Structures are given as structure tokens and as C-alpha cells.
Image (cartoon, rainbow, N blue to C red):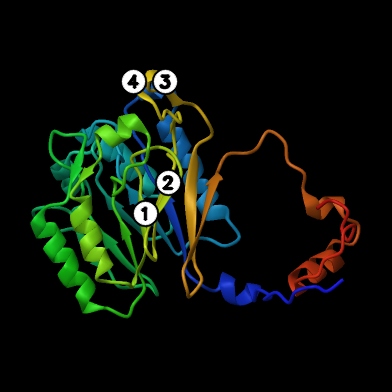
Amino acid sequence: MVHSVRAVFDWEAILGFMLIAQITDLHIDEPGGFMRRFVDANAKLERAIEYLLTREDRPDVVLATGDLTNDGRPEQFHLLSELLERLEIPIYLIPGNHDEREGFRSAFSDRPWMPTSGPIDYVIDDFPVRLVGLDSSEPDRHDGTLSDGQLAWLDATLSEEPSKPTLLFLHHPPFLSGLWLFDAIRLEGSDGLRAVVGGHPQVTQIIAGHVHRPVSYHWGATMITTCPSTTHQARCDLNPNEGAGVTDDPPMLQLHRWTGEGFITHTTTFESAAATIEISDSVSDWDGVKTRILAGPPFPKGAGGVF
């Protein structure tokens, strides 16, 4: 039998690249709030923060992509700020349709990236990947927009660093997800965004929230992903006759690993599983097996016994 030659990952090199955590649709609420009677969003965020802080490979940055609060009230932003105080990782946030823009601006007025007026659009140049936040929220509406002025700003901003890999983050995904309820409150201006991104191939990834589910799409070489919520999830309702439901499925977040060529996106829960088999405890010669795995293929059946 002839085995094809496959590339061997340089794990040390890959782990040295940038790791971005995405949390979204936090829906922080006061005690007794409607959603907290269904699921405790505040406690879920606390556990998400604990998960990120205790990972072996702690993320370099956290992006929070909107619906940070349930109603945008100052009290909710205050609770959110208190919860985020424990996060020892740089975090960059944008508002969603459940957040009031001016309340958001007031709550995070001490952040150097915060614009003093208008949409909360900004760029972070402190990392190997350029991070560009776009404010798709629209006052008093659940659907989102990107104005001509925002798109012109984005075009000029991307033109400043044409060779630096770039990730865009916003709340409303710029494509039809197939989830009928969320497509009804979709992003207006997505065609304009696509035209701008099409002129800037350094935009490798666009990440969003809003739909409370993991969904992926692509514009040519640009991948677009949506992240599940840290609290409740949306049912996969693809037809209006199915109704519109939210569930207490496990809360989740996403990890986006930059490899130097593109992003690898992982969707993961951050709460303890009901049952786990710890492979390293089930193999007598784990160190030897691990060494063989890291050396790359071929990896014969039975070499480890649990795969």
C-alpha cells in the first residue's frame, strides 16, 4: 500500500499565532428580567470568562459582537462592566440591536478606541491581525444598517494597510442565513459591504453574532462566520411554519486561530460536559502515543486504542 505524503503540522509554530475569542449576544439583564427567568445570562458570562482565563492557550484578545445587554438600560451596562472587570484579556466591543448606542458609548467612554460621536466604528492595529469593528446597530430598530459614510470610512481604513491580514467584526451578519426570523431583521447595506471587501483581499475573515447559531458563508476568499450566544440559542427554524423558538441548548463561544495564512474557527461550549473520557488517562503510554501523534501520519489503527 502506498501512503500519500501529507504535510506535518508544526504545532509549536501554530500555537504561537494569534488566538481570538468571540463572545456574542450576552443579553446581560437585571435580576428578575424576562430572559433571566429562562436562563441566567449573567452567570453564563461569568463561566465564559472563567473558561477563557483558565485555558492552557489563553486568547490574545476577546471580541464581543453585540447584544451585550438585553434592553440597553444603564443598569444593564453597569452589570456588564462589573462582570468584565475580571477579564484579564484585552476586549473590544460593538453594540447590537438590543443595545442603545449612547448607553454603550457612556459605559465604555474610557476606552481609547471609542469614537466621540456617530457610529461606533474603529480599528485596532496592535496585533498581527488588524481588527476593524463596525457598528451595524440602528436606533429603535432590530434590523441593522451600514451607511454610505460608514462604507466610505471602511474603504479608506482598509486602504491604509493593504498588506496586513484583517478581520472585520460586526453584529448583524452580512448575508441571508436561512433563519427566517433573523433574515427579517437582517443587515441592510450588505451589498455595499461586499463591494468594499471585494476590493481589499487582505480581509480574510468577517465575524458576526445576532443569529444565536454557528453559520458560515463566504465571499470569494473571505470567510464569514456567526457565533452562537453565551446564553440561549436560536432553534434552527428555516421555515416560518416552524415558528420561532429559542432554546436552553449549551452556551457557546468561538475561537479563531490565525495560522499566518487564514483562520481556523472552533465553536465550543464552555460549561462542563455531562460525561468526558480523558484520553490521556485512558492510555498507559500517553507520552509515547502523544509523541507519535505529533510526529504526524501515518498513524496505524490500534496505536493508542481509543481513536
Q: Secondary structure at mark 1?
A: strand
Q: Distance between the Cα atoms at labels 3 and 4?
A: 23 Å
Q: Distance between the Cα atoms at labels 4 and 1?
A: 28 Å
Q: Quadrant of residue 182?
A: top left
Circle nearer the N terminus (3, 1)? 1
Of all residues, the one furthest to the front in this rendering is 1
Q: Residues within 10 Å of mark 4 (few under 14, many from 20)?
A: few
Q: From the viewer's perspective, is the residue at label 2 or at label 4 nearer?
A: 2
Of all residues, the one furthest to the bottom in this rendering is 163
Q: Residues within 10 Å of mark 2 (few under 14, many from 20)?
A: many
State yes or no: discs 1 and 2 in contact (Cβ < 8 Å): yes
Q: Residues within 10 Å of mark 1 (few under 14, many from 20)?
A: many
Q: Secondary structure at mark 4?
A: loop
Q: From the viewer's perspective, is the residue at label 3 or at label 2 nearer?
A: 3
Q: Distance between the Cα atoms at labels 1 and 2?
A: 8 Å
Residue pointed to by mark 1: 207
Q: Is residue 205 left or right of residue 16?
A: left
Which quadrant, please, contains the N terminus? bottom right
171 lies above or below 197? above
Q: Secondary structure at mark 2?
A: loop
Q: Is residue 37 left or right of residue 197?
A: right
- Give the residue type that dot 3 points to: Glu
State yes or no: discs 3 and 2 in contact (Cβ < 8 Å): no
127 lies above or below 74? below
Residue pointed to by mark 4: 34
Residue pointed to by mark 2: 227
- Give the residue type that dot 1 points to: Ile
Residue pointed to by mark 3: 242
Q: Residue at position x 18%, y 39% from top?
A: 100
Q: Distance between the Cα atoms at labels 3 and 1?
A: 27 Å
- Give the residue type that dot 4 points to: Phe
Q: Residue at position x 21%, y 78% from top?
A: 160
